[in-house]
């Protein structure tokens, strides 16, 4: 988008017949075909939000994504309406009526703008090899796609997860495969999955008033330790969902609601210590092990799908029975069944992606890696070659599109493509909602540029330097300064 708008000749090759990769918004879902199921990435955090898992703290901060959403004028709403909960600060993209529009809208809008500026987007065009255009890398690259066509390119940017990226370079042969792209081997990948069930009567809202918050179920502890970690249990079906996650419309008589409930989001190991481990092992047999798509549409017409819907409904009923009993709704909800569901498993079996998320390996000392360090090394994995990488797998904010966006803008900066000025804005400063943030960042920039400032009563030198530490600068638009040359 930005490269095309600057006058560059851009061609986008997409392996599948849809854009987005792990941003996978399934529209026209439900019996009335007016609901959206987010089978992949779907939310962003304009300001840092923090979640604690036991002794682990997860910090989510995606200001670049937020800045681009604002720049594209895409409407958004608060993800979790409960201001007391950790994810209240996150947002999702909606339509003009405030209904879920799908996170894919962000990708579609950028592609549309790129095409308006002359970019060519080709779907079903898997890149199978890269080669030298001339005798040396500086003369450009040849891009080969699966149907045999070849294209000359001055620069190539790969927005590919780890496995597809390293396998493409290996398969390319010749001079390309003769260089070991060490940074691309640094991350580790792991699967994630999501499971959404649809009810014609959204009983968790209609009867229990549960419009926000998380839930999970429990099971007896493993009595005979085995050698298989996170071994699943026969029943109940593992649950780990959120009431505010799932598209619901309240347009039935009496303002009653219908829609999807997120029954599970995670992997094999529970976020809560007393939850049920092995969820991925439990749900995997109900999906396709090798597929072009992460999503399996669960319909009661297939026997194995009907069984899964029965088991998940029974687990939801058991978990909520005390609350349903209190409002005399247990029998009515017990008689219901989910009309359909979507099971989306991002694992090694999804062709062209092969993972849910990535994170860098620990340092030899056992310490965590420095944010942005891997992104800077992986951005040009073959030194001196016009091959660049921009993906969540290597980015400064793992498991979020922010990583791809930050690395993309860093690559464009190296290629001399003009970007919107990062600016000294309160949204990214150390004191939000006050001019202090803008002033602090402005003075930090001036200090970096060697402009003398009054010594006392202004910014302390420690604060000025701290603003440019990798941990502090992560995600500040237009890109993480730690990624710049």
Image (cartoon, rainbow, N blue to C red):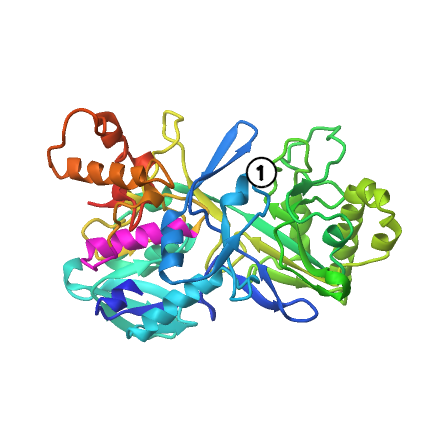
Residue behind mark 1? 84
Q: Is residue 151 left or right of residue 241?
A: left
What is the x, y in percent for residue 403? 38, 49
Q: Quadrant of residue 444?
A: top left
Looking at the image, which is closer to me, 422 or 33?
422
Looking at the image, which is closer to me, 303 or 244?
244
What is the x, y in percent for residue 341? 68, 60
Q: Quadrant of residue 30?
A: bottom right
Asked if 367 appears above or below 178 in the picture, the reply is above
Asked if 202 appears above or below 14 in the picture, the reply is above
What is the x, y in percent for residue 98? 55, 62
In terms of secondary structure, where does tag 1 sit?
Answer: loop
Residue at 24%, 71% (x, y): give it.
Answer: 9
Q: Is residue 405 magenta?
A: yes
Q: Which quarter of the figure is the N terminus placed in?
A: bottom left
Q: Is the magenta region chiefly helix, strand or loop?
A: helix
Q: Is residue 145 visible?
A: no
Q: Is residue 218 visible?
A: yes
Q: Which residues are magenta?
A: 401-420
Q: Quadrant of residue 37?
A: bottom right
Residue at 26%, 54% (x, y): give it.
Answer: 411
Looking at the image, which is closer to me, 175 or 27?
27
**How many labels, in total?**
1
What is the x, y in percent for residue 100? 56, 61
Crowding around mark 1 (Cα neighbors within 10 Å: few <14, some 14 to 19, many 20+) is few
Residue at 54%, 33% (x, y): give it.
Answer: 52
Asked if 403 appears above or below 258 in the picture, the reply is above
Q: Is residue 368 left or right of residue 463?
A: right
Q: Is residue 119 left or right of residue 7?
A: right
Q: Is residue 435 magenta?
A: no
Residue at 49%, 44% (x, y): give it.
Answer: 89
Q: Which quarter of the figure is the C terminus placed in?
A: top left
């Amino acid at each position: 988008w930005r490269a095309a708008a600057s006058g560059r000749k851009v061609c986008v090759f997409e392996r599948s017949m849809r854009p987005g990769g792990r941003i996978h918004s399934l529209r026209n879902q439900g019996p009335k075909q007016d609901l959206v199921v987010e089978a992949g990435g779907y939310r962003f955090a304009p300001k840092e939000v923090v979640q604690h898992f036991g002794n682990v703290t997860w910090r989510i901060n995606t200001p670049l994504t937020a800045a681009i959403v604002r720049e594209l004028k895409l409407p958004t709403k608060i993800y979790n309406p409960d201001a007391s909960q950790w994810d209240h600060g996150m947002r999702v993209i909606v339509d003009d009526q405030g209904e879920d529009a799908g996170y894919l809208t962000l990708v579609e809008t950028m592609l549309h703008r790129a095409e308006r500026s002359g970019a060519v987007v080709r779907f079903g065009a898997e890149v199978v090899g890269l080669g030298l255009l001339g005798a040396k890398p500086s003369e450009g690259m040849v891009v080969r796609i699966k149907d045999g066509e070849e294209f000359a390119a001055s620069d190539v940017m790969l927005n590919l997860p780890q496995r597809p990226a390293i396998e493409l370079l290996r398969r390319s042969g010749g001079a390309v495969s003769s260089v070991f792209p060490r940074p691309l081997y640094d991350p580790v990948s792991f699967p994630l999955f999501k499971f959404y069930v649809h009810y014609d009567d959204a009983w968790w809202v209609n009867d229990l008033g549960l419009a926000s918050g998380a839930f999970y179920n429990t099971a007896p502890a493993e009595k005979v330790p085995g050698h298989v970690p996170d071994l699943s249990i026969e029943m109940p079906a593992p649950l780990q969902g959120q009431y505010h996650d799932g598209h619901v419309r309240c347009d039935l008589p009496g303002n009653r609601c219908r829609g999807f409930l997120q029954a599970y989001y995670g992997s094999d190991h529970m976020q809560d210590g007393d939850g049920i481990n092995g969820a991925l092992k439990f749900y995997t047999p109900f999906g396709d092990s090798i597929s072009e798509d992460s999503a399996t549409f669960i319909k009661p017409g297939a026997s194995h799908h009907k069984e899964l819907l029965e088991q998940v409904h029974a687990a939801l009923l058991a978990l909520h029975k005390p609350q349903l009993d209190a409002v005399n709704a247990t029998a009515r909800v017990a008689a219901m069944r989910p009309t359909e569901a979507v099971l989306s498993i991002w694992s090694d079996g999804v062709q062209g992606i092969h993972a849910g998320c990535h994170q860098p390996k620990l340092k030899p000392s056992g310490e965590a890696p420095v944010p942005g360090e891997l992104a800077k090394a992986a951005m040009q994995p073959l030194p001196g070659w016009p091959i660049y990488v921009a993906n969540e797998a290597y980015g400064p904010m793992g498991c979020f599109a922010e990583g791809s966006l930050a690395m993309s803008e860093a690559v464009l900066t190296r290629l001399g493509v003009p970007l919107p000025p990062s600016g000294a804005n309160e949204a990214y400063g150390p004191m939000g909602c006050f001019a202090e943030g803008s002033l602090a960042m402005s003075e930090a920039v001036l200090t970096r540029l060697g402009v003398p400032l009054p010594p006392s009563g202004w910014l302390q030198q420690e604060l000025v330097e701290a603003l440019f530490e990798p941990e502090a600068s992560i995600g500040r638009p237009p890109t993480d300064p730690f990624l710049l040359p």
